[in-house]
Amino acid sequence: LLLLLLLLPEQRQETPPPQQHAVYTIRVPPGVRPGGAFVVEHLGVHYQITASDPPREDGAVECWLPAPPGHQPAQPEVEIQVCQAGACRRAGSEAVLLEIEELGAGLLCLSVSAADGCLGACDEAPNAIVVRRGTEVLQSRLDKVEKTAALVAAATGATPNLDDPALRQRLKEARQVRARQQAREEKRWNGAMQGLAEQVAASADESKRLDLLLELAELEEAAGQWEAALEHRRELQAASPDEPHEIMDLATTLGKMGRVREIDELQRLAERALSDPEDKELLEHASRHIADCRVDAARSASVGAAQEVERPIDGYALWRLASATPVSRHSALYRFSSSDRTRGTPLGKSAGAELRHVTWHVTMLARVGPNAEGPLPWVERDYTPVSTWMDWEKGRCDILIKTYRPGVATGWLRELPLGSAVHLSQPMQTLDVPSLVPDSSALDEASLGHSGVLLLLAGTGIAVAASVLRHADPASCFRPPGRSRRPAAPPLKSPVRLIYACRRDDVLMAPEIAKWCSAGV
């Protein structure tokens, strides 16, 4: 019998080919409002169609429906491009792209891709454009699954089915995960933690809840919220009392807080949990880690007793506000100074440890107290310094900031006394130079340079001009440490043109602009 079964041919179930679609022009029934839905029968099946908004002059709507047998497939006529620039990525645009792909699956009329560069509506992220017959239409604030579904319906005429609660929840969670991942990469801890505690409380799956709780504890620890992290670490350790990694993670948090006695108790707990001879190596590893945490705890306790110490925030250094100089009716130049050795460097490094030329920016934590952007007592704002990389290396940073009324971060900064502590992130890459794209690693040699560069800037965005044009100046472009006094070959060799827009009472960096022009940059 066994031999007979082995000789039987494998029964494979053929996957049916995808059904072809075609464009149909359908007249909208009387009484249906723009954007409203109506039902049509096609090839014996009823379909829900969305009316055009605004309506077409002929009172019809074009949509893609299954084609009759023998129909030759057409090329996609509608393309949705989802922005993947910084603000949109932070708002979960990667998940929006996946949502559109899933909701539009099977629609041969639709092509979905990432947009080439920023779409320019950063305040309304996440964004996408619908391209049809050469016409582009911007769609903004795609912050809910329902809005993404409405976008697919408006673009194709086919209404996605959102009746499946599991699908809606899966898409919602994917967007939350993508947004948190992006915020973690940028070390925007308040944004990364937004809504996470509520997800932990609402999770009915205990395994999933513990995974979310672990992520929350990691974020709290990175943000210097040690008491909250300790509470959640204890809960995780209680759920898995014999898990050595939970014991070691708890020891790490206690070490930062100077809790020597509690770390000693963890050592005894580890010895009981790993008493099996087979766990000898794991016990030795855990004991070494706990011993290191005990040293950290003793150091933290002694320093804390001697003076009040600002808690470190992962990815940020401590600076002081040195001066605030008004430069127009609406803007001021803020100078910060620091001796914190964790402030990092703007000098980029490639995988081969070679110098990488980039423009750069920093994130400021504005301690405004409770806010709608997350559970932490600060909001996070990105700024491009107008000072040079050499100034940063010396512990000086100048930022040109416009005061908005009301402005959460700028209002806080305007009232900040001189000498106050401010957290600035380590420098982060904005664009590669000379390509002036976020990541040029995939470009060929011919695409790295340009015959010319046009900068379109407005208001305090003029700071970007300084960041770019310094790479065209031998005296200010990047060069390896130890050669800071010798001019270097600038990577940006193509001519740069600048169009600058501003209010009459808010003209910024006029002397610098005149200097660049006279220098023939």
Image (cartoon, rainbow, N blue to C red):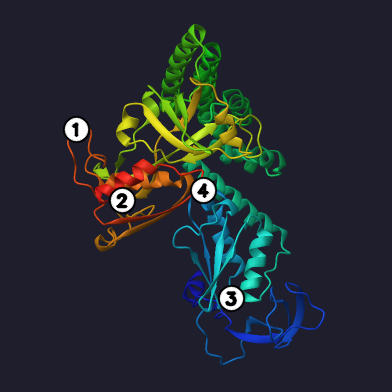
Location of mark 2 (residue): 433
**Residue designated by label 1:** 485
Quarter of the view holding residue 484: top left
Query: Is label 1 in contact with label 3 (beta carbons under 8 Å)?
Result: no
Disc 2, SS: loop
Instruction: Give amino acid for label 1.
Output: Arg
Residues packed near mark 4 inside 10 Å, few (<14), some (14 to 19) or many (20 plus): few
Residue annotated with mark 4: 503
Instruction: Give the vertical position of 378 relative to 493 (above or below).
Output: above
* Cα gap from disc 2 to disc 3, whole angstroms: 40 Å
Disc 2/disc 1 C-alpha distance (Å)? 21 Å
Which one is nearer the viewer's eye here, 152 or 60? 60
Of the residues under marks 4 and 1, which one precedes in the sequence? 1
Percent across and percent down for residue 254 are 53, 19
Left or right for 229, reference 298: right
- Asked if residue 274 shows in the view, the reply is no
Q: Secondary structure at mark 3?
A: loop
When asked about the image quadrant of residue 488, the answer is top left
- Residue highlighted by disc 3: 107
Mark toward the viewer: 4 or 2? 4
Residue at disc 1, secondary structure? loop
Numbered circle sitting on residue 390: none
